[in-house]
Image (spheres, grey):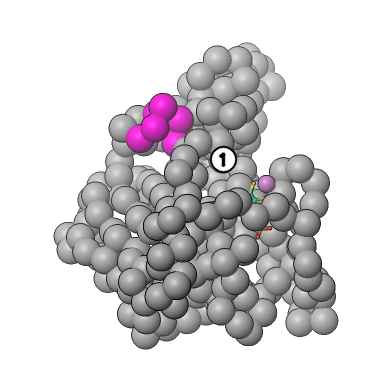
């Protein structure tokens, strides 16, 4: 079946099922099409599944809004900065020349990249909005290498379904599906507003996912892993956020 007719069938089916026999049928349909997020347990999970499936089907390739330079917010932003551990401080003292982003899992060429290497790949800028679930937000220009480019260098295998990413800050990790991982606006970011990405804002390296809420934008990333099963990580919910009651899929 072509992608388009599959999509039409699914959209029609989802609408009918949600109207006629309620959430359970729609959820079963979402499951059949592989559109079930990893934090789908319980009653709350039905809602999560519907949001995720509907977004994926209806808006899977849409772009986050980009703004003109005149809309860039004035610092300081309202974000708290976590205290940095010794490992981070040592790397910072060395100008982050020792920082590595390792890439492993379902890739043909596992390995790692320095910041300098990442900067040799085609970069992309975007002026986008970062919104925290707690209600504040800012607009900034981000510079980085598309995650899709890093995945291509590593040779992502066809059975890959998710990319999980980990911070040097303990317990901060998250994951996205391949649609978001390959989305042209998803960046491994090293710059903001024309300067190096400042340590307080996630420097030297941060995942920038403008199609999702602030907490998916993990700061100080040191590792990516490509997988077809998120159950193996943490408590199996796809990120640390659902462990605290936040949704794995935080699409906006
Ligand atoms: N490593 C790490 N990444 C993180 C966080 C954090 O505390 N540690 N906070 C998250 C949350 S909840 C939000 S809203 C954004 C805040 O981004 P900002 O500091 O650029 O405002 O970063 C996300 N990434
Ligand atoms: Mo947040």
Give residue 174's position: percent from left, percent from top: 47, 45
Label 1 residue SS? loop
> Which quadrant holds residue 224?
bottom left
In this rendering, would 79 be left or right of 177?
right
Residue 20, visible in the rendered structure = yes
Give above or below for 70 relative to 198.
below
State which quarter of the image contains the N terminus.
top left
Region rendered in magenta = 233-238
Residue denoted by label 1: 249
In this view, the residue in front, 228 or 236, is: 236
Mark 1, other Cα within 10 Å: few <14 / some 14–19 / many ≥20? many
Give above or below for 146 relative to 86.
below
Q: Residue at x 35, y 30 (%)?
A: 231
In this rendering, would 11 be left or right of 75?
left
Q: Residue at x 69, y 22 (%)?
A: 19
In this view, the residue in front, 190 or 154, is: 190
Q: Is residue 244 magenta?
A: no
> Which quadrant holds residue 242?
top right
In this rendering, would 210 be left or right of 10?
right
In this view, the residue in front, 3 or 124, is: 124
Q: How many marks?
A: 1
In this rendering, would 123 be left or right of 22?
left
Give residue 86's position: percent from left, percent from top: 43, 56
Residue 30, visible in the rendered structure = no
Q: Residue at x 72, y 43 (%)?
A: 133
Give residue 12's position: percent from left, percent from top: 59, 35
Q: Residue at x 59, y 29 (%)?
A: 244
Q: Report the predominant secondary structure element of the magenta stretch.
A: loop
């Amino acid at each position: 079946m072509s992608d388009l007719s599959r999509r039409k069938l699914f959209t029609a089916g989802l609408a009918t099922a949600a109207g006629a026999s309620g959430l359970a049928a729609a959820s079963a349909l979402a499951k059949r099409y592989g559109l079930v997020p990893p934090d789908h347990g319980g009653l709350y999970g039905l809602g999560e599944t519907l949001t995720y499936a509907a977004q994926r089907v209806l808006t899977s390739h849409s772009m986050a809004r980009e703004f003109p330079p005149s809309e860039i917010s004035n610092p300081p932003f309202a974000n708290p900065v976590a205290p940095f551990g010794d490992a981070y401080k040592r790397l910072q003292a060395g100008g982050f020349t020792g920082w590595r982003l390792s890439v492993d899992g379902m890739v043909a060429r596992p390995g790692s990249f320095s910041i300098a290497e990442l900067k040799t790949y085609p970069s992309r800028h975007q002026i986008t909005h970062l919104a925290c679930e707690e209600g504040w937000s800012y607009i900034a220009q981000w510079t980085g290498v598309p995650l899709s480019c890093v995945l291509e260098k590593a040779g992502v295998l066809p059975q890959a379904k998710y990319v999980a990413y980990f911070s040097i800050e303990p317990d901060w990790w998250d994951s996205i599906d391949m649609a978001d991982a390959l989305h042209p606006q998803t960046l491994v970011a090293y710059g903001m507003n024309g300067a190096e990405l400042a340590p307080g804002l996630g420097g030297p390296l941060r995942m920038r996912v403008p199609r999702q809420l602030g907490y998916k934008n993990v700061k100080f990333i040191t590792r990516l892993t490509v997988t077809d099963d998120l159950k193996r990580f943490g408590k199996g919910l796809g990120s640390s956020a659902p462990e605290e009651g936040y949704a794995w899929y935080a699409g906006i």
